Amino acid sequence: MRTNSEQVQFDTFGYVTFCHAAFVQTDANSTFSSGWEDIYFRERYHLVDPVIGFGQANFGRSAATVLDPAQMAGALFEEARAHSADSNVAMVSHFGGSTRIFGGVNHDLDARALPVALESLQADHRRDLAAGLRRLSDMQLDLLDLAEEGHSDKVIANELGVSHSLIAQRKRAICETMGMTCWRGVVQLYTLDKWHGIVPGEGFGQ
């Protein structure tokens, strides 16, 4: 991850993105070795992982912290070190009903750099969510375009020649495709993407 003023790098990192306060292996997207990921879930370390605990405590909002030595004691971190997966940085990005919990390894990171790191995580999160726009149908994009212009559901229904209830169904389908739960967030993301407002630059691991 690079910024104009400062560079924050993680030797390894992993994250999970979800819409509800749940954590399952199939949601994990990690650069950690598959061997470590298998051990992590087999031993149920996610139940005691302070990174996950921080994410769940901050579900619904963005936040970042550096773990202290006491939090990194115990069997989890003893085994994690052998796999270069002893994450000492925990961050949470929340956007439009989608929450991403991030754990990264950088034992030299100054806590003063956390806002920079969090900003980059949030940009990566938004970029990944925006990829969902490419999976929408033309009809769904037409609805989004009208919503982005500020039209009410009644006007949108009239414009598209469908019922008001069908607009509500299509909204739910769009949210599901996007991996988000907040319609307002979907529209905001569409606006950012449409006008190239998503923060440009390089993200984690690039």
Image (tube, rainbow, N blue to C red):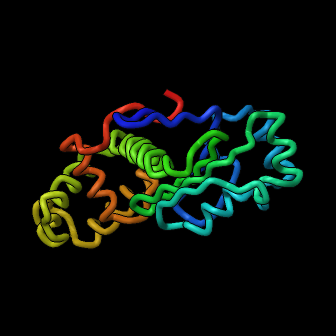
- Residue in front for this viewpoint, 61 or 27: 61
Using the image, determine if residue 31 lies above or below residue 72: above
Return the x and y of residue 145 as percentages of the image width and height.
18, 53
Return the x and y of residue 18 as percentages of the image width and height.
55, 56
Q: Is residue 28 visible?
A: yes
Residue at 29% from the left image edge and 43% from the top image edge? 198
Residue 86, image quadrant: top right
Q: Is residue 27 visible?
A: no
Return the x and y of residue 37 as percentages of the image width and height.
76, 40
Direction from residue 68 to residue 192 in the image, left or right: left
Direction from residue 7 to residue 109 in the image, left or right: right
| Most distant residue in the top direction | 206
For the image shown, how many numbered marks are present on the structure? 0
Using the image, determine if residue 27 lies above or below residue 164: above
Residue at 81% from the left image edge and 47% from the top image edge? 77
Direction from residue 149 to residue 120 in the image, left or right: right
